[in-house]
């Protein structure tokens, strides 16, 4: 008789028992109301909350599904809270919040949009996903015209990524509405280190400027402070700065490049003036010369920016040991091993969560030097195949009311995208820090839509041009190539590979 | 010419319809898409062979094609080289260890990749104690994850071949004094050539369709460094370049079709192979303890990543971010499991549902056509 028989009866019974135990435990926990989320990156449930408590605006009916990327600790709870409140006010409406891991958002949304599925009705997305999803989302301009959304309450620079522009800079579509403001990169730091009087007096007598991250207004000051902290061994590493090889090295560079480009006529980026500070973006990487799109990153400012970027990453583990992508920027600062770090403001609730952070309650926040801090708002778009786009628009409008924003700020530290919402959030303890960033936001302007449209017409910008930049910049960080050669190589490759859509 | 029974013909209709709807139609549709390009407003425009002509200019295609070939060749080669000694030890010790060995084969590819990348994280992973180099950035890590997942299946195929060698042949070899390594070279391996070939081709297909370790490893290696054609097509498609993605898929389809032909032919192989057995090759069985040591080494390779992921799942959030990482959780937390069974329950239910539907659909569609093919000796 063979020794390798099929699965025995005992094994089958065992498997069935295990499945039953899982099902019973799951049912028990579900009825108990669910266990608290312990990590911020885990996907959350697909829930439909019924049982409205108050009825103030009868008339609306229907159902909506909202696709929400998980990962941001404030976003999902805020959307669920708004959904509950909306259903409470409109008992005939049911809303299902459907979380999806950040990395799968585009694939999930695009699959539905391309196949003209009516669900999800609403899709939440980030600026880097706007150019991919925008063409498939509903043009929301009619809702601005009808007054469903209040255009004057939204900072123009925040709305910009939702524009689909023609080659002359004309707006052909607005593919969504910003509802959550995220500033980035900002400088976070351990307050206790900078409150240490011994360190403070030694630093200030040696370098002659304040030992205060909110006063580091140039890159040199930040680097000097990091060198000082590293030499004192206060923490294992002085500064955490993005050099991740998927995206963050690129975004980190954009922020630095911008500060130099503003003062470099070669780039053609208008300098800060009475009209305001030009909004950051990839658009600054290109300009048009005699009808041809050419890169600007091999201008002097591009090379200076790369050198500064390398100086900023010298205080963390080398790029070949650990490249600092979004996850690492979020998670490593929690360890308490870093005195300062570049971060998105959406990380703040995680940093201040005592159950998972060693720096909780000790986190200070300041803009990056030389107005390098930009914004990466979160948008909500409507599926054009939705069964009820008007209901979806009303849900968005409800979400952006000051009352909902105030609740979101108080309960979750959620940061609104509108002027009125930010004003409300500035009065809430959790989000009071935003008051320091409102002037920066008001200062941001959109100088030239035609130039901003250039990058959108390079159809392989993300698939071909960005990888050239990332790999070459990484080689410079590894010491394999000079900054000048790196930028010249990148510019030459970009010219060679660029596919420009008509 | 033999007449086809109408009843048998009807039996094959579901599978043939499925083939047309889910294989032939997508192939044609994909080819048509490869002749288009998408503009910034999402509209498709006919562009002839421009996507294929871009192959010449594409700066990454050479690297990506060579990566594809590397995964495609190294995965089966390592699998076969590693599976043979394991199968020999299994045969000597007994198949009771097969259950543990097979565990990685039942783990979804993305989970397997996540396990490995958790373990080789230079700060929070086991790798902290081994190397300061970031193993996640190496192309060989992708091969390692592939081999970890596919080796059990290769072992099972080869072991089943060895187990089916007739007892008479074993006895005759023993009488002739042919044992140990000499027997392996002169008797066992030549007799299991079809199984080795089948394992090789199956693992080649696994290597060709590598995706998840690339998806997870790219943030540490850099864009396009680990990519193969499958991942590259995916990335292009979801970055708003569907026409070029379709052209890459056409290229891949040519490769995989060629492989399918080889696979089907290898299944029909009944030839044996004569291997040289030089005189220095020992003709004695290795002691049992040597087989046990070999088995132990393999089990460590299979089980350590699984142990690590379980340990991580039981740690508290604060312990998770401790550097150096703790090898054994200091305090056990069930919070992640509670979360999984409450908030994650819909995903569990969906997974079980999808698996059931897949199995039932496959059986319903394939059983009638398999019966037809067997009856008519076709295919």
Image: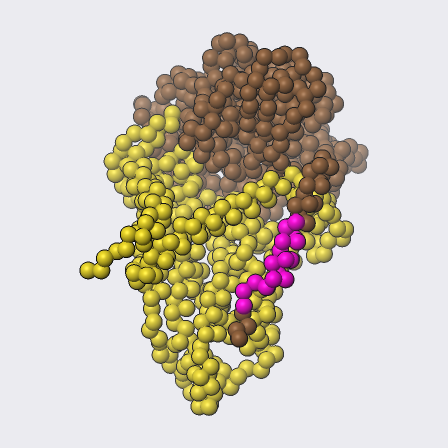
Chain colours: A brown, B yellow
Q: Is residue A82 left or right of residue B202?
A: right
Residue A168 on the magenta segment: no
Q: Quadrant of residue B248?
A: top left
Q: Nearer the viewer, residue B52 or A194?
A: B52
B351 or A416, which is in the foreground? B351
Position of residue B258 measured from the top left corner of the image (x, y, whole percent) = 31, 56
- Assign the magenta stretch its main secondary structure: helix
Tell me residue A5's x, y (percent). Answer: 54, 68
The C terminus of chain A sits in image quarter: top left
What residue lies at 40% left-to-right and 33% top-to-bottom?
B240
The residue located at (53%, 51%) in the rendering is B108
User: For residue B242, what is the image quadrant?
Assistant: top left
Magenta residues (range) = A5-20
Residue A18 colored in magenta in the image: yes
Which residue appears farthest toward the left when viewing the image? Answer: B1
Which residue is drawn at the image coordinates 34% and 61% (left, top)?
A: B374
A233, above or below A199, in the image: below
Compared with residue B142, is residue A475 higher up or lower down, i.e. above or below?
above
């Amino acid at each position: 008789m063979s020794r390798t028989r099929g699965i025995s009866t005992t094994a089958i019974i065992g498997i069935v028992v295990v499945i039953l135990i899982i099902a019973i435990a799951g049912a028990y926990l579900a009825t108990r109301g669910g266990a608290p989320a312990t990590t911020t990156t885990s996907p959350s449930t697909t829930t439909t909350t019924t049982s409205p408590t108050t009825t103030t605006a009868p008339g609306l009916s229907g159902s909506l599904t909202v696709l929400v990327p998980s990962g941001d600790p404030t976003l999902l709870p805020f959307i669920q809270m708004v959904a509950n409140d909306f259903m409470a006010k409109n008992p005939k409406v049911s809303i299902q919040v459907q979380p999806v891991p950040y990395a799968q958002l585009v694939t999930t949304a695009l699959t539905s949009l391309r196949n003209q599925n009516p669900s999800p009705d609403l899709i939440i997305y980030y600026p880097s996903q706007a150019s991919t999803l925008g063409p498939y989302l509903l043009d929301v301009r009619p809702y601005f015209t009808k007054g469903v959304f209040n255009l004057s309450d939204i900072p123009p620079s925040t709305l910009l990524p939702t524009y689909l522009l023609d080659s002359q800079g004309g707006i052909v579509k607005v593919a969504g509405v910003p509802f959550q403001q995220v500033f980035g990169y900002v400088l976070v730091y351990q307050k206790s280190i900078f409150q240490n009087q011994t360190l403070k007096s030694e630093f200030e007598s040696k370098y002659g400027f304040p030992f205060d991250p909110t006063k580091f207004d140039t890159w040199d000051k930040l680097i000097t402070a990091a060198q000082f902290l590293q030499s004192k061994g206060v923490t294992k590493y002085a500064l955490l700065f993005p050099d991740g090889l998927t995206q963050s090295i690129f975004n980190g560079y954009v922020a630095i490049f911008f500060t130099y480009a503003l003062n470099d006529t070669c780039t053609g980026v208008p300098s800060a003036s009475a009209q305001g500070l030009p909004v950051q973006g990839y658009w600054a990487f290109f300009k048009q010369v005699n009808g041809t799109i050419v890169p600007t990153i091999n201008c002097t400012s591009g090379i200076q920016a790369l050198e500064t970027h390398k100086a900023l990453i010298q205080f963390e583990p080398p790029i070949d040991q650990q490249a600092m992508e979004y996850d690492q920027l979020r998670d490593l600062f929690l360890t308490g091993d870093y005195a300062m770090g570049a971060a998105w403001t959406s990380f703040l609730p995680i940093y201040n969560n005592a159950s998972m952070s060693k720096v909780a309650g000790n986190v200070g926040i300041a803009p990056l030097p030389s107005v390098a801090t930009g914004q990466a708002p979160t948008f909500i778009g409507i599926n054009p195949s939705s069964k009820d786009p008007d209901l979806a628009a009303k849900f968005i409008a409800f979400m952006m009311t000051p009352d909902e924003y105030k609740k979101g700020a108080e309960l979750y530290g959620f940061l609104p995208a509108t002027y009125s919402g930010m004003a409300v959030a500035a009065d809430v303890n959790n989000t009071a820090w935003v008051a320091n960033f409102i002037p920066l936001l008001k200062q941001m302007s959109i100088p030239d839509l035609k130039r901003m449209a250039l990058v959108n017409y390079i159809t392989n910008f993300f698939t071909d041009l960005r990888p050239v930049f990332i790999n070459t910049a990484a080689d410079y960080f590894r010491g394999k190539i000079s900054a000048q050669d790196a930028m010249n190589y990148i510019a030459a490759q970009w010219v060679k590979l660029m596919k420009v859509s008509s | 010419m033999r007449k086809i029974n109408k009843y048998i013909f009807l039996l094959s209709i579901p599978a043939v319809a499925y083939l047309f709807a889910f294989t032939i139609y997508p192939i044609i549709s994909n080819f048509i898409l490869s002749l288009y390009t998408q503009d910034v407003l999402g509209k498709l425009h006919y562009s002839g062979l421009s996507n294929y002509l871009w192959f010449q200019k594409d700066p990454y295609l050479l690297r990506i094609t060579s990566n594809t070939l590397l995964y495609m060749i190294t995965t089966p080669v390592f699998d076969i080289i590693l599976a043979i000694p394991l199968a020999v030890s299994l045969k000597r010790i007994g198949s009771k260890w097969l259950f543990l060995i097979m565990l990685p084969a039942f783990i979804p590819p993305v989970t397997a990749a996540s396990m490995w990348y958790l373990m080789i994280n230079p700060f929070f992973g086991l790798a902290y104690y081994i190397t300061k180099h970031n193993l996640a950035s190496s192309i060989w890590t992708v091969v390692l994850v592939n081999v970890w997942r596919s080796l059990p299946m290769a072992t099972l195929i080869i072991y089943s071949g060895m187990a089916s060698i007739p007892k008479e042949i074993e006895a005759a070899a023993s009488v002739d004094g042919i044992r140990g390594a000499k027997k392996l070279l002169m008797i066992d391996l030549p007799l299991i050539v079809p199984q080795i070939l089948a394992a090789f081709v199956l693992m080649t297909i696994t290597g060709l369709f590598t995706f998840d370790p690339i998806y997870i490893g790219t943030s540490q290696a850099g864009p396009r460094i680990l990519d193969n054609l499958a991942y590259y097509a995916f990335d292009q498609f979801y970055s708003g370049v569907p026409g070029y993605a379709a052209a890459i898929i056409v290229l891949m389809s040519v490769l995989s079709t060629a492989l399918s032909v080889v696979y089907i032919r290898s299944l029909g192989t009944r030839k044996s192979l004569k291997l040289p057995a030089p005189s220095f090759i020992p003709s004695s069985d290795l002691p049992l303890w040597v087989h046990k040591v070999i088995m132990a080494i393999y089990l460590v390779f299979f089980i350590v990543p699984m142990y690590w992921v379980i340990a991580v799942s039981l740690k508290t959030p604060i312990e998770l971010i401790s550097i150096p990482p703790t090898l054994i959780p200091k305090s056990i937390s069930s919070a992640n499991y509670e979360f999984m069974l409450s908030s994650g329950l819909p995903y569990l239910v969906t997974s079980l549902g999808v698996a059931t539907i897949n199995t039932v659909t496959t059986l319903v569609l394939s059983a009638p056509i398999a019966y037809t093919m067997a009856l008519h000796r076709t295919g």
